[in-house]
Amino acid sequence: MTQMPSALTRSACLIDGEWRKAASGEEIVVTNPADGSEVGRVPSLSAAEVEEAVAAAERAFADWSKRAARDRSAILKRWFELIVAHADELGLMMTLEQGKPLAEARGEALYAASFIEWFAEEGKRVYGDVIPSPQTDKRILVLKQPIGVCAAITPWNFPAAMITRKVGPALAAGCTMIVKPAEQTPLTALALGVLAEQAGLPKGVFQVVTGDAKTVGGVLTGSDIVRKLSFTGSTEIGRILMAQSAPTIKKLSLELGGNAPFIVFDDADLDAAVEGAIASKYRNAGQTCVCTNRIYVQSGVYEAFTEKLAARVGSLSVGVGTEPNVSIGPLIDDDAIEKVEAHVADALEKGAKVLAGGKRHARGGTFYEPTVLSGVTQSMRVAREETFGPVAPVFRFDTEEEAVTMANATEFGLAAYFYTESARRVWRVAEALEYGMVGHNTGLISNEVAPFGGVKQSGLGREGSHYGIEDYLEIKYLCTAIG
Ligand code: ADP
C-alpha cells in the first residue's frame, strides 16, 4: 500500500499557529476511494474550537490587513514556490485521498499553486479611484479595503485548487481566511497549511478546521466576525449556506453545480471535437463541475461523431491512480457510483443505447467504465441532473436554435462548450448560451488568469483573474471637503 508523504501529513488542525487535535479526541477517518483503506485521521472539532479559530482570524486581521501589499505578496510567493516544490508529494496525497490519477493530481498541485502566484501579483495592483466632483469644494475618492475575516468551505473533487483559488485572493487583499475542507479530502488542505507555515504566513492568517460539516458550517455562517463566505459545492448546500448567512448579511461567493452542454455542429472539426469531449467529460472521472454533462450533436455528423467518440473512449484505461498510465480512477464513494448507475438505467429504460461501457468496472469498488450513450433525449435524468461520473450521453439536434434552446433548458449556468468552424456562428452561439464560461473549439477552459464562475443557480462571484480579488475587497467612498 502506498503511504501518505509523511513530511506533509498532519492529523491535527491549524488554529492560531498551532497544530491542534479536538479536545474530545474525536476524529474523522479519511479513506482511499480506490480500496476503502484508511489513509489518515483528522480532528472532529467542536463548535467552541471553531470559534477559537474565528477569534484568531480576527486578531490576525489587525496586522495582516495593514501590511504593505508587497510584503503580503512576498510571503505568498514563497508559499507558491513551496507548493510547486512539493507538487509530487501533494499529487500523491490527492491520489490517495481523492482517487484521481497521479499525473492529473500533480497537475492539480501546479494549478493550485498558480492561484497563489497570480494573486500575489494582483494584490499589488488593487487600485482605487478619483471621481470628478460635481462641487468644486469637494474631492471624491474611492478606496478598496479588505473585507475582513473570510471563511471557505470546499469540496473533495479539487482538494488543493479549490482552496488556493479562494485563499490566494483573500490573503493578497489583506483578509484572513479559515478553510473547512471536505471531510473526504482534508489531508491535502492540512498539507497546504504545513507549507503556509514554512512560507512564513503569520499565525491566524490561514487556518484549517476539520469536523462535522454542519457544526463547522454553522459556526462559520453564524458568526458576525466572519464577513464573507466562499463556497464551492452543490447548489443544494449552497442554498442552505446562503440562508444561514442571511442573518449576518455576509458577502458570498458561490461556485455551485453545473450541467455543461457540449454542442457539436455539422461544420465542426470532428476529431478535435472528440478530443475536446474526452478532455472535458472524463477528467477526474467526470467529477468536476465544468465537466461536460450533455453532448448535443447535429444530425449530419451524429453517427460519425458518436462512433469516433465510442472508439476513443474504449482506449481510456481505468485503474488505481498510483498505477502507471491510468486515465480514470475510482469515483469518490458509493453514493457517487449509485447515482451514475441510476442515470444510466433511467436512460436505457427510456430508449438510449450503450455504445461503450455502461456498467460498473470489473475492478469492483467504485470503478465505473467510461460510458457513451446514444439516442438520448431531454426526458431522461441525464438531461436535467449533473451525473458527476464518466458517462457521455449524446443527444441529436437539427437546428442551431434547437441546440441553444436545449442547452439553456436548465437552472444551471456554469460552463458550456461548442465546436464549429464558422466565425459567424461563434458570436451568435457564445452570446446566446446562458453560461458564465463558454469554450469554443476547446474542452478545457480553467486557468488562473480567466474569470471562473456561473450564472443562474450555478453561483455568485468570480474566481481567478483580475476580477477574482474584487470579491475580497470592499469599496469605501471618501468625500473630502477642501473649501
Ligand atoms: P459534494 O456533492 O461535492 O460533496 P457538497 O455541497 O455536499 O458537495 O459539499 C461541499 C462542501 O460543503 C464540503 O466541504 C462539505 O463538507 C460541505 N457541507 C456539506 N453540507 C454542509 C452543511 N450543511 N453545512 C456546511 N457545510 C456543508
Image (cartoon, grey):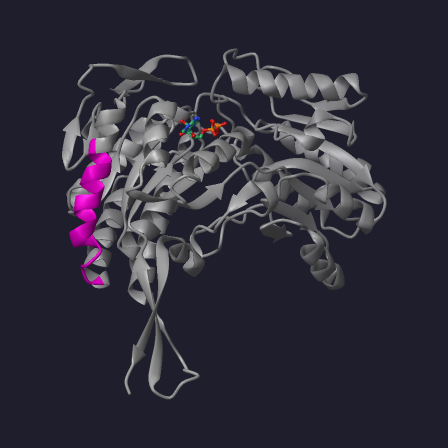
Res. 366 in view: no
Query: Which quadrant of the figure contains the C terminus?
Result: bottom left
57 in magenta:
yes
Residue 425 vertical placement versus 155 (above, below): below
Residue 245 vertical placement versus 445 (above, below): above
236 in magenta:
no
Q: Main secondary structure of the magenta part?
A: helix
**In this orientation, which residue lies closer to the viewer: 139 or 325?**
139
Q: Position of residue 145 (x, y in %)?
A: 30, 60
Residue 107 vertical placement versus 173 (above, below): above
Side (left or right) of 249 relative to 194: right
Residue 377 vertical placement versus 442 (above, below): above
Query: Which quadrant of the figure contains the N terminus?
Result: top left
Q: Position of residue 249 (x, y in %)?
A: 41, 45
Q: Quadrant of residue 322?
A: top left
Res. 483 in view: yes
**Which span of residues is magenta-colored?**
52-68
Callout count: 0
Q: Position of residue 36 (x, y in %)?
A: 40, 12
Q: Quadrant of residue 135?
A: bottom left
Residue at 84% x, 41% y is 299
Q: Position of residue 98 (x, y in %)?
A: 41, 26
Residue at 65% x, 25% y is 371
Side (left or right) of 174 relative to 287: left
